[in-house]
Amino acid sequence: LWYKTHVFTYTIDAVAEEAVVLFFFAVLLHSRLALLGRGYGTKRASILMLVTWLGPVVAFIYGFHLSYQVYVLQLDVILASVGLGSLMLEAVLIAVLGLVLADNLAERLVLLLGSGATVAAGVVLGLLHLSLESSTAFPDQDQPTTVSMR
């Protein structure tokens, strides 16, 4: 964000919005990691259920960084893609661990649904970025314009 504000023209509102989103993203990731460590340490599926249902929120924030910033750098795309991929892999691994630790069918179902929602959100947001990347707001903006003076 510091680099973008010095290189590109940003309004104060856009900088504030991206800074707030980054702050809440860091808090969310930290809380997910803390809950995941506690859930693994205590071997409780209920904590892992909470972690899996925080996954789609994290995926939507990654999607924001992929598609809806004022300026999206190639480095942003690479980091967000790696983050989405690792989030989806993490969701699958948490589902496997949760299936082992869960005591009843309801816990297993909630874990599977949360992991599925995380993977689905990651796939949808990745595909959304690809569709936005290939389309432009002005269909002929990449074509050279010819101006004739009469």
Image (cartoon, grey):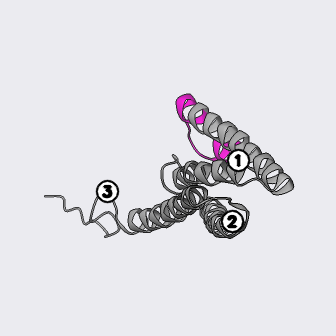
- Which residue is tagged 2? 90
Rendered image quadrant of residue 102 = bottom right
Residue contact between numbered discs 1 and 2, judged by CB atoms under 8 Å:
no
- The three-letter code of the residue at mark 2 reads Glu
Amino acid bearing label 1: Tyr
The type of residue carrying mark 3 is Ala
Secondary structure under badge 1?
Answer: helix
Q: In which quarter of the image is residue 41?
A: bottom right
Return the residue at label 1: 3
Residue 16 at x, y percent in the picture: 60, 31
Q: In which quarter of the image is residue 133?
A: bottom left
Single out the mark in the foreground, 1 or 2.
Answer: 2
Q: Main secondary structure of the magenta part?
A: helix
Instruction: State which region is magenta.
Output: 1-15
Residue 137's label in the rendered image is: 3
Q: Can residue 72 be seen in this view?
A: no
Q: Disc 3 and disc 2: Cα gap in Å?
A: 35 Å
Q: Is residue 148 above or below residue 42?
A: below
Q: Could you tell which of marks 3 and 1 lies nearer the N-terminus?
A: 1
Badge 1: residue crowd in 10 Å (few <14, some 14–19, many ≥20)? few
Name the image quarter holding the C terminus.
bottom left
User: What element does badge 3 sit on?
Assistant: loop
